[in-house]
Amino acid sequence: MHSQSASGLLLLLLLLSTPLSSATEPEHSREVDLNNPAALQEATRILAEEVKLAARPQTYVIVDLVHHAVVIKGRGVELHRFPIADWSAAHLADASTTFRLQARPPVGRRKIEPAAGSEQPPVSLDDMPTDFTLQFTPPFSLTVHPSASSAFWRWLRFTGRESWRWLQEWTFALATGTAPPMQPLLYMTVDSRHAQSLAWTVTEGMPFLVQRPPS
């Protein structure tokens, strides 16, 4: 155990001493408790994965459950950050790799006003959903939804839809004797505008990392 902690500390110090880019990152993005072996191991894993992602001209997302933030980055540079109000998860121990987004969330187009003619206005941030579920490869599900205080009716609609989906899955499981697949599930409560911002940003195949809190 001591040798693993020492090697993890050495790799972490090496990665921290090698900046991902020439830009200065917020100090809290690199904070880690060096006296906590589990936190050290997780921080080392995230940094090692991020070094590989930052070497390519792509945008990637870190869902940082330690600092309660979603961080959108490119080439190691932080492009955007917004807070996570609350989260819950299942099988989070299996969220230990880079996940690739299968598809963007659906866009809810605004209705065309009769007086505005037949021309469809361009898609904007306002057309993005405030609650949606992202599916990834390897199997991982990330559900984003607003809080009850910020958007009560949307939250109620989302909760009802998710409860109905859960009931269908377990009804099928009980009827067939086949349990639902065990995969990492993450439910994340964010501000409605931040949810729309994330939906606007993500693209098919975009990499996601999940930084897990020490268990």
Image: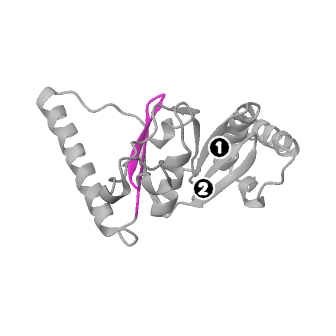
Say which residue label 2 marks.
66
- Which amino acid lies under the numbered mark 2 shown in the image of this protein? Val
Residue 151 picture location, percent across and down:
36, 68
Q: Is residue 203 above or below residue 70?
A: above
Residue 32 appears anywhere in the view: no
Residue in the picture at 32% in, 53% down = 111
Look at the magenta stretch and give its main secondary structure: strand
User: For the view shown, which residue lies furthest in the bottom direction?
Assistant: 149
Residue 170 picture location, percent across and down:
20, 39
Say few, some or many: other residues with alpha carbon within 10 Å of mark 1 (under 14 / 14 to 19 / 20 or more).
many
Task: Tell me whether circle 2 and circle 1 mark residues in contact (CB < 8 Å).
Answer: yes
Answer with left or right where residue 67 lies relative to residue 128. right
Answer with left or right where residue 188 lies relative to residue 97. left
Q: Say the numbered circle drawn on residue 178.
A: none
Q: Is residue 198 above or below residue 138?
A: below
Quadrant of the image for the N terminus?
top right
Say which residue label 1 marks.
42
Residue 18 picture location, percent across and down:
87, 41
Range covered by the magenta-colored residues: 130-146
Residue 65 picture location, percent across and down:
56, 53
